[in-house]
Image: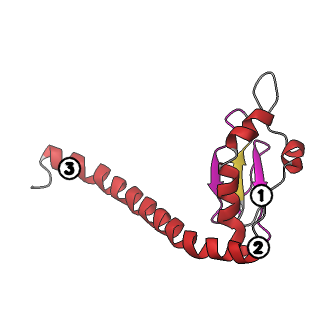
Amino acid sequence: MLPADAILMTSRASIGFFALANRPVCTNQGFITVVPKLDCSRYFLLFEMMSRVEEFRSRASGSTFKELSKGVFRELSVLWPGQALLAEHAIIIEPIIDQIQTLATMNSKLRVARDLLLPRLMSGELPV
């Protein structure tokens, strides 16, 4: 099991799609998982990885489908800004990410409500 703060990246065929684990998860061999060592580095690492997708894709190999191997990924270095800058980054970015997640949840709930109500409105079952 991977911890709730893990960063997941697809590493086969469609390389470079990301997810943040909000709870403990398991993945298959088609993912590279990064578990931040510091609480304040999760989003920094995510954005660092997202900015390097083209590099990841260029290092992938394979004839049937491209794959970025874990060995190749481990050889890559990360420019580390230091604890103070990471903490500043977290203070700025965490509320933004939280708002994005809240809005995505609300959007999903609104979509469900629309899908339940629209047919009833269209059929006349619910008055307008």
Residue at the extreme left: 128
Number of the label disc, if any, that sits on residue 38: 2
Q: Closer to us: mark 3 or mark 2?
A: 2
Main secondary-structure element of the magenta-colored stretch: loop
Quick check: can you spot residue 4?
no
Q: Which residue is mark 3?
A: 120
- The location of residue 117, given as percent across then percent down, is 24, 53
Under tag 2, what secondary structure?
Answer: loop
Q: Closer to us: mark 2 or mark 1?
A: 2
Per the image, is 18 magenta?
yes
Residue at the extreme top: 63
Looking at marks 3 and 2 on the same chain, the residue that comes earlier in the sequence is marked by: 2
Measure the alpha-carbon separation of dots 2 and 1: 12 Å
In-front residue for pair 109/77: 77
- The location of residue 47, given as percent across then percent down, is 64, 56
- The location of residue 55, given as percent across then percent down, is 74, 40
* Disc 3 crowd, CA 10 A, few/some/many (<14, 14-19, 20+): few
* Disc 2 crowd, CA 10 A, few/some/many (<14, 14-19, 20+): few
Magenta residue span: 13-38
Per the image, is 121 magenta?
no
Measure the alpha-carbon separation of dots 1 and 3: 46 Å
Measure the alpha-carbon separation of dots 3 and 2: 50 Å
